Structures are given as structure tokens and as C-alpha cells.
Image (spheres, rainbow, N blue to C red):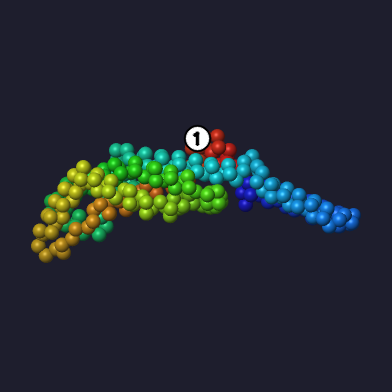
Amino acid sequence: MSPFHHNLYRTMKRTVSIVAVLTLLLMASNVSTMHAQSWLDKAKKTLKDVTKAPVGGFTEADAAAALKEALVQGTSNGSAALSAVDGYFGNPKVKIPFPQDAQKIESTLRKVGLGSKVDEAVLSINRAAEKAAVEAKPIFVSAIQKMTITDAIAIVKGSDSAGTSYLRRSTSPALYAAMLPVISKALESVNATQYWSSLMNSYNKIPFVEKINPDLPAYTTEKALGGLFVMIVEEELRIRTNPMARTTELLKKVFSK
């Protein structure tokens, strides 16, 4: 149990004891039922108010606000890092490779001397993802702003990647829908589509091979989203565990506890 919830539990337990003692004293002194009920109602209200009072220097509302700040910071940093030149291509954790279902194509093309063309296609795919990464930020911010206090507290009490998991569940469809057309356009602008079509045509002309042409925009979008969440979970963990990553007073107050 965290210090926050331990202190809250102790305060609630103490208040419940007070309510019980008051009730016994009122019964022992033969106070009227109506008067006793009035005292008991006041005691119950005190208990309810205590659960909302600051514990350990901050309230649950503070904790929820701090989590939202942390997630906005993490998603902003993650999308900014990936939208930079080599944000995908230069990071082995998120670099987008030749499509898995086209690995046979890559191997065959390299064997027939088209390795440089494969490399050009991979670079252009990653450049397209970098151009589209910036589109993710407003979608993340909107989802974070809609988060309830109940959601936020559950995330605070969850694992170090609970915030990222919440965002993955709540934003993936919107992110895919928003990024697919951007990536499709970016693939055109960096000549990825041209490189890809040229490679597929070269491969499909090789005798006795099975003709294939994977959906490049869909593949690139899925891999780009996967890389985005890799970066966000790293940012979330950094804010939770590294005091230097907490850039606001609220983050320092809540996460230091």
C-alpha cells in the first residue's frame, strides 16, 4: 500500500472509531432518537469529508491532475522525438523494417543485386512515419483531458505502464484513422511508394515467385503507432521514477510521494 493510501486508511479508520464512540455515548445518555440521529448524520458527513481532504500533502484530485500532466508531457515528448529526422530510422527500438510478410521479397531482391533499392525503400518508409508522428499529439491530449478521476486514480495505483496502456486502449482507433492518410501522403512525398512499386515490380518479374504486394500505408501506420507507444511508455516510466523528469510543482508533489 502506498503512503498516500496508507494515511487515508488510517484517517478513515480513526473517524469510523469516533462515529462508533459517539453513537454509544448518545445511547448511554438516553438522548432522544431524533437528536442522536442528528449527531450521527454529522459524524457520517465528517467521515465523507475526510476522504476528500488532503492526505500526505495532496488530494486525489491533485493525483489525477498530476497524472494528466505526466501523460501530456510524455506523449508530447514521445511524438516530438519521433517526428524529428531519424526519429524512427535512427532508433533501433522503433525503426520500421521491411514488412514481415515481405521478408522473402527482401532476401530475394538482395540476392539479385537490388539491396540498395531495398535500403532506399526502408529509409523512405521511416521518413514517412516521422512526418506523421506529429499528428498523434492532439489526439492523445484530447483523450487525456477526457480521463475521469476514477480512471486516473486506477492508473496511479497501476503498473508503471498503466497510463500508456490506457492511452493505447482509448486512442488506437482514432490514431490509426488520423495517421493513415497522413502516412499515405508522406509515403508519396518521400518517394516511398515509388520505391515500393519498383521493388514489387522487380520481384514479381522473377520467374517462379509468388506474386505479392503488401499494403504499404497500412503496414507503415501500424508500425508507426507501435513505435509511438514504445516511446510513450519510456516517458511514463521516466516521470514515475526519475525526479529530474518532473518539470512542474504538481508532478514533484505527487510523484515524490
The answer to whether residue 182 shows anywhere in this view is yes
Mark 1 surroundings within 10 Å by alpha-carbon count, few (fewer than 14), some (14 through 19), many (20 or more): few
Determine which residue is flagged by label 1: 247
The three-letter amino acid code for the residue at tag 1 is Thr
Q: In this view, does 204 lie to the left or right of 151?
A: left
Q: In this view, does 210 lie to the left or right of 234?
A: left
Residue closest to the far front: 34
The count of marks equals 1
- The residue under the point 25% across, 52% down is 217
Residue 47 lies, in percent from the top left, at 71, 50
- The residue under the point 23% across, 53% down is 216
The answer to whether residue 21 shows anywhere in this view is no
Q: Is residue 104 above or below residue 248?
A: below
- The residue under the point 45% across, 40% down is 73
Q: Is residue 108 above or below residue 67?
A: below
Residue 44 lies, in percent from the top left, at 73, 52
Out of 215 and 202, give the one closest to the viewer: 215
Out of 88 and 194, give the one closest to the viewer: 194
Out of 151 and 26, give the one closest to the viewer: 26
Disc 1 is placed on an element classified as loop
Residue 147 lies, in percent from the top left, at 50, 48
- The residue under the point 51% across, 37% down is 246
Residue 75 lies, in percent from the top left, at 42, 43
Question: Residue 31 falls in which quadrant of the image?
Answer: bottom right
Residue closest to the far right: 29
Q: In which quarter of the image is the C terminus?
A: top right
Q: In this view, does 153 lie to the left or right of 185?
A: right
Q: Is residue 71 left or right of residue 58?
A: left
